[in-house]
């Protein structure tokens, strides 16, 4: 039986809850296109997290009306998590932080060999903003994603930040800057490669 294709889910953590134009969407879409070139299938549309009711908390189900359990399942069903966020006040968006807080539950969700439910899953990030801070935001996300069990490929982040004190958004650019296009391609290539390796060989658990 042939191996199942590698799949990716993309989360747009923009503060925009509707389908209003989003620079984060543009960058996520570019990386998804690159991933498709490596045989990676998107697990549905890009998820605009702000349009869901993701309740505050650190468990996998915060009760009636919580949309996290369904999104959690989609995240864990995919081989690659692509997490996109704008920069606000030098930080990941509050929506992005909510996603990370909810994944804190993974720390206590382990199998009989001590492996978290996210073990064997790959994560990468896309960051956009109009001021400096992309390296800082990537560092925060890398640490959090690794803490909750995801594996990061080499060059696991791509980003764009505009010049300070100006109002051009990434979605308004007439062409993709070459360094961003190169980073997008490298992220996709390495994430697809790593996901393929982990899909065929899960991490060893603790001895029974």
Image (spheres, rainbow, N blue to C red):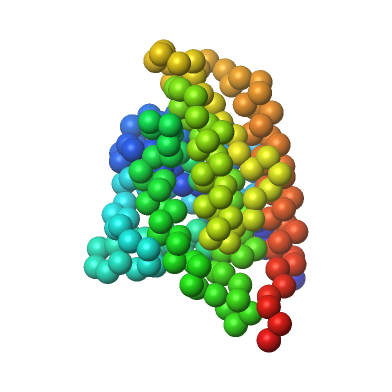
Location of the N terminus (image quadrant): bottom right
91 w.r.t. 81: above or below:
above
183 w.r.t. 32: above or below:
above
Q: Is residue 196 left or right of residue 70?
A: right
Q: Residue at x 40, y 59 (%)?
A: 102
The percent position of residue 202, horizontal first and vertical second, equals 70, 68
Q: Residue at x 71, y 44 (%)?
A: 154
Q: Is residue 7 left or right of residue 140?
A: right
Residue 32, by quadrant, is top right
164 w.r.t. 140: above or below:
above
The percent position of residue 165, horizontal first and vertical second, equals 41, 13
1 w.r.t. 159: above or below:
below
The percent position of residue 94, horizontal first and vertical second, equals 35, 43
Location of the C terminus (image quadrant): bottom right
Residue 14, by quadrant, is top left
Residue 57, by quadrant, is bottom left
Q: Residue at x 68, y 40 (%)?
A: 155
Task: Decide which of 146, 40 is in the foreground and name it.
Answer: 146
Residue closest to the far left: 64
The percent position of residue 35, horizontal first and vertical second, equals 65, 43
Residue closest to the far top: 166
């Amino acid at each position: 039986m042939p191996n199942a294709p590698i799949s990716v889910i993309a989360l747009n953590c923009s503060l925009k809850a509707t389908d209003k134009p989003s620079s984060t969407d543009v960058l996520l879409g570019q990386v998804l296109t690159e991933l498709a070139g490596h045989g990676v299938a998107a697990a549905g549309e890009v998820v605009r997290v702000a349009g869901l009711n993701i309740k505050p908390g650190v468990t996998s189900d915060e009760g009636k009306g919580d949309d996290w359990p369904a999104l959690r399942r989609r995240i864990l069903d995919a081989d690659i998590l692509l997490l996109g966020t704008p920069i606000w006040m030098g930080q990941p968006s509050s929506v992005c932080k909510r996603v990370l807080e909810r994944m804190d539950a993974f720390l206590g969700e382990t199998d009989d060999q001590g492996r978290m439910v996210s073990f064997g899953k790959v994560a990468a990030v896309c960051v956009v903003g109009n001021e400096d801070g992309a390296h800082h935001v990537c560092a925060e996300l890398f640490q959090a994603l690794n803490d909750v069990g995801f594996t990061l490929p080499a060059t696991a982040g791509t980003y764009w930040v505009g010049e300070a004190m100006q109002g051009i958004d990434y979605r308004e650019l007439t062409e993709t800057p070459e360094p961003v296009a190169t980073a997008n391609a490298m992220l996709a290539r390495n994430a697809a490669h790593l996901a393929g390796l982990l899909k065929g060989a899960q991490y060893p658990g603790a001895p029974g």
